[in-house]
Image: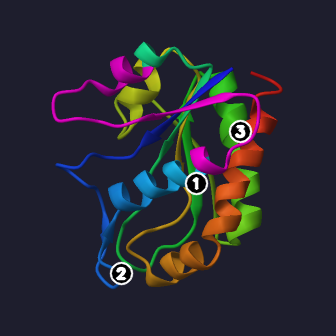
Amino acid sequence: MKIALIVGHKLASQGATNKTYNISEYDINNLLIDNIIDRYTGTHTLVKVLRTTYSILPLDINNQDPNFAISLHANAYNTKVSGTEMLYYHNSVKGKLIAEVLQKNICNVLGLNNRGIKPKTAEDRGGYVLKYTKCPIVIAEPFFIDNDYDCDIFFKRRDTLIQCFIDSIDQISLFI
């Protein structure tokens, strides 16, 4: 089984940031995915997907032909909102199941506000990649990067979060 792990955002457009830690979504997710792949000892193949300036993300993912995909991001709003949420395509049964597993497991590890799983349509932010990626896919938003408390929790529990993703991948692979 092959699982695609997508780095949220790209070098030229790094997504939301945390001013206190001087980090971006791209920085965190690039490192997080490297750590997940380095520590994974299971039987599946994990592939990292990076967006480039000229890439079309669903096509890049589809070219890898994965069984399922997780796009790692970090939320941002107003420096005060906190929590964990997962986004999936509204009519994807398997996407919803993946979102449920990740939401439960990551909430248990980080202990942040459970903002739930959220169905998205093609017109919603993030919906394009959710609709046009052939395999089941979710967008994981484990914490709010612009919230210093959430970032503190992320850094304190990063190793546990890495293991949580690994365990979740193995758990998800049982029903995909």
The segment highlighted magenta reads 37-61
Please tell me whether residue 2 is drawn above or below residue 31 in the rendered image: above
Q: Amino acid at mark 3?
A: Ile
**Residue 63 location, x and y as percent?**
41, 14
Three-letter code for the amino acid on which mark 1 is drawn: Glu
Q: Residue at x 34, y 17 (%)?
A: 59
Q: Is residue 57 magenta?
A: yes
Q: Is residue 152 magenta?
A: no
Q: Establish if 43 lies above or below 14.
A: above
What whole-number distance in Å separates the C-alpha atoms at marks 2 and 1? 22 Å
Mark 3 Cα-neighbour bin, 10 Å: few <14, some 14–19, many ≥20? many
Task: Tell me the residue that label 3 is attached to.
Answer: 169
Comparing labels 3 and 1, the label whose residue is closer to the camera? 3
Q: Which residue is mark 1?
A: 85
* Amino acid type for the residue under numbered disc 2: Tyr
Residue bearing mark 2: 21
In the image, is 14 to the left or to the right of 31? left
Q: Residue at x 47, y 18 (%)?
A: 64
